[in-house]
Amino acid sequence: MIQQLSGAVVLALLLAACTPKVQVALPAEPININLNVKIQHEIYIKVDKQLDELFSDDSGLF
């Protein structure tokens, strides 16, 4: 009986020693988010609008 009890205690200690540990720590370097955004789309829209106004029916160009 004592041998079973001591075996259970040793098993409990071994299982307690294997519990995972979760830590929340701040990174050493700041988080860098690189956003590659092209602005060309906006420029093309502005040029297209200006060309539409230039070639509109009301301009009398054609």
Image: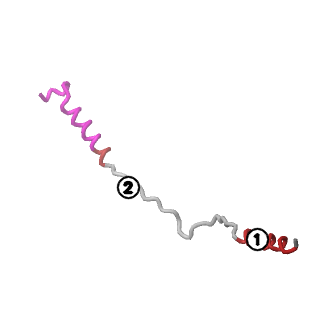
| Residue indicated by mark 1 | 11
Kindly identify the residue that appears in the image at 25 percent across and 41 percent down: 47
As drawn, 29 above or below 37: below
Looking at the image, residue 58 sits to the left or right of residue 39; the answer is left
**Which is nearer the eye, 27 or 10?**
10
Kindly identify the residue that appears in the image at 62 percent across and 66 percent down: 25
**How far apart, in angstroms, are the residues tagged by discs 1 and 2?**
55 Å
Residue 1 in percent (x, y) is at 87, 71
Quarter holding residue 48: top left
| Residue indicated by mark 2 | 36
Residue 19 in percent (x, y) is at 70, 67
Q: What element carries label 2?
A: loop
Which quadrant: the C terminus? top left
Q: What stretch is highlighted in magenta?
A: 44-62
Looking at the image, residue 62 sits to the left or right of residue 3; the answer is left
Looking at the image, residue 26 sits to the left or right of residue 7; the answer is left
Magenta stretch: helix, strand or loop mostly: helix
Disc nearer the start of the sequence (1/2): 1
Looking at the image, the residue that sits furthest to the front is: 1
Q: Which mark is residue 38?
A: none
